[in-house]
Amino acid sequence: MRFGAQEFFRGPGQPFTITFGHRVLLPRENHVTLEPNEWSVGKLVSMATTHSAEAPDRDGLQEHFDATIARDQRIEPRDWMPDGYRKTLIRQIAQHAHSEIIGMQPEGEWITKAPSLRRKAILFAKVQDEAGHGLYLYSAAETLGADRADLTTRLIEGRQKYSSIFNYPTLSFADVGVIGWFVDGAAICNQVPLCRSSYGPYARAMVRICKEESFHQRQGYELLLTMMRGTDAQRAMVQDAVDRWWWPSLMMFGPPDDASPNSAQSMAWKIKRHSNDELRQRFVDMTVPQADKLGVRLPDPELRWNEARGRHDFGTPDWDELKRVITGNGPCNDRRMERRRTAHEEGAWVREAATAHAAKQAARAKDGAAA
Amino acid sequence: MSDTIKGDWPLYEVFVRGKRGLNHVHVGSLHAADDQMALTHARDLYTRRNEGVSIWVVRSEHIAASTRDEKDPFFEPSADKVYRHPTFYDIPDDVPHI
Amino acid sequence: MSDDHVYMTLAEGHEDDTRWAYGTGFEDPLHGVDTTVPEGVDAGELADVCVALADDALVSAQRLAEWTTRAPELEEEVALANIGLDLLGQARLLYSRAGQVDGTGRGEDAYAYFRDADDFRNVRLAELPNGDFAFSTVRLLVLSSWRLAQFAHLVAHPDPVLSAIAAKGVKELTYHRQYAAEWVVRLGDGTAESHRRTRKALEQVAAYFGELFTAYDVRDEVAAVLCQVTGAAGLPMPVYRPLPGAGRAGDHTEHLAPLLAELQSVARAHPEATW
């Protein structure tokens, strides 16, 4: 039997579209939920009929998976995995990829207006990196049997989400610095633990991404340091940007733990390594001393050091606002989606032309070989 | 949506030799309409055009594979050997220096 | 996890702060190069050459930046940004050289942000709006072929700095030309629609050929490239027509002033600021 790369790199095909054979009765009467597709089902059926004595691995799919997770080893594309694990991963990786791609927009608006050529080059390279990160992540999602075109369709039809933070407008060039400092800083808090995610391709993509994100955060902070040493108008721009981005940045970590029902399962699967609230706390603890050094005020009257906890206390973000933004009613949701949709649709003739040319070339090569 | 699906580019797997003395390693995938575009994209995306590295690209559907993890419950160890066979990669070493 | 180890080694190859200073370049091309103007080189002429080539690059990079978040596929986002970053890097080096030799001591930003359209010396083809992907790739093909031919000559320039900049640029421009040529062939050969768009783009671009062939005698080289590419793409070779005026003399279309207004907006709103 010849397995295409779809299986090797992508995992077993499209697990959600095939409707037969969800449950297979194995010799020892273990019920195993499968990713049903032609070869897995066929294989299991044949196993069931041979009724071998040495079948502990074969009927212990869930156990094998659980043991791999427990040993902190990675799940790789062709391994058996629970349906929920696959679905959760696809959703999480796709959201992450969409966030990178939509995240190009708020900063991308400033590439053409960057006030020095050095800043222009840095920002251009940074936004380019985000396109690259999106591609790494879509690539990881495709190892699970997802298809990038399908994920893109889901995004532009509003059926899959991206990070709420990118629905806020960038009003001045200081926003570029604050996005680097806060948003990329928050992303690093979120993402560094994901380098140890249980799913191999995702973890490996995150290693690359985290290396580049640290540049991003540094460039943002360095821009703000420079601006704070500049004119009064520049300092005011920085403080204004900090005031606007602080709370949305805290919301990036998602709803509080008691309102985040899927988190526990994701943590058990080691798809997620820390809770939303823990990551939010880390971000605050990391950022407060940086704000002091920079000479800006974080807009939270409740923010103070708690000696007993050894951490900062801080106020509660406006969770209703997060809900509004996530459900499509943030200040820039429509604009962001419209841009992505337009680029995709206006690029269709280009993608088609390349496909048509490739087909013609292949036909010519065939004719040439036949002649 | 049929328009966009018609134009969808196939998936390529990308293998990069980071420096001399190392094997090519699978680094990820990308979409491209043809081999040349796949090499160009791979260079842009996975090496950020770092000179001197070597890139292989191959249409994902052309790779035959078996797992090497004997504990993998689905596969006999000898399911398919093509992927592991060195001559499977019929791409000369110097292709990537575009 | 030996694969992981190799994978990490791969990623480590890219850790280098200098990429931020020179676009996607990894090293300072001027490292160790003597910056004094050699005897026999006219400093004023050298500065003019540098500014003209820098203006072409900056204006082109600005147009490429406008493609950001609008490219026809995500892989092309990365590719177009690479080209834009290369050109931006070339512009910065060339402006810096101009400032060193024209006696003003101006930095790169003085040239980019505090000159008006009349003072820009880029060719008009570079400043035209992006149009569709066909127009942008056809223009890129022409401009990169033309620039590559010039840079290949400039490698032998007596000024060691300009020579070094050109040597670095030749590698970059070779890639730009290849990228553009591949796309023009795909679009010309692809579908009826892409063929029509590319043919139209060639005609539009050809109207601005006239001023490209003055500084260096590179017309034959560029024509040979275009002939080869259009042949492979099944497109007619565009007709060359003279064009009155010259971007090199400060003549521009109505499109340059708005491009510069955007580019310069923040810098001019805060003339005392440091960034």
Image: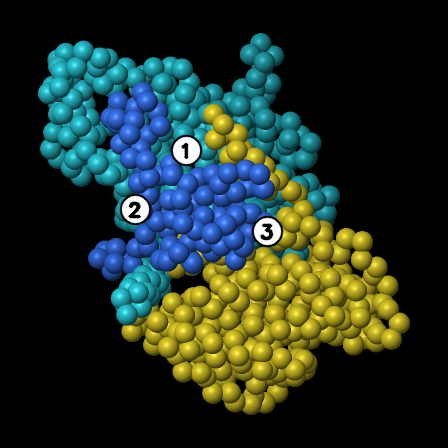
Circle 3: residue type: Glu
**Camera-nearest label, 2 or 1:** 2
Figure colour of chain B: blue
Q: Nearer the viewer, residue B80 or C29?
A: B80
Residue at horizontal 31%, vertical 33%? B66
Coordinates of residue C88 in the picture (x, y in percent): 62, 60
Q: Chain of mark 3?
A: B
Q: Amino acid at mark 1?
A: Tyr
Q: Chain of mark 2?
A: B
10 Å crowding of disc 3: few (<14), some (14-19), many (20+): few
Q: Is residue C137 above or below residue A135?
A: below
Label 2 sits on a secondary structure element that is helix
Q: Which residue is more in the foreground, A234 or C204?
A: C204
N-terminal label among 3 and 2: 3
Residue at 30% from the left image edge and 65% from the top image edge? A369
Residue under pointer 1: A202
Q: CA distance from mark 3 to mark 1?
A: 27 Å
- In the picture, which chain is yellow? C
> In the rendering, what colour is chain A?
cyan
Residue C209 image point, x, y percent: 54, 82
In the rendering, which numbered label is found on residue B61? 2
Quadrant of the drawing holding the N terminus of chain A: top left
Of badges 3 and 1, nearer the viewer stands 3
| Vertical side of C139 occupied by C92: above or below | above
Q: Secondary structure at mark 3?
A: loop
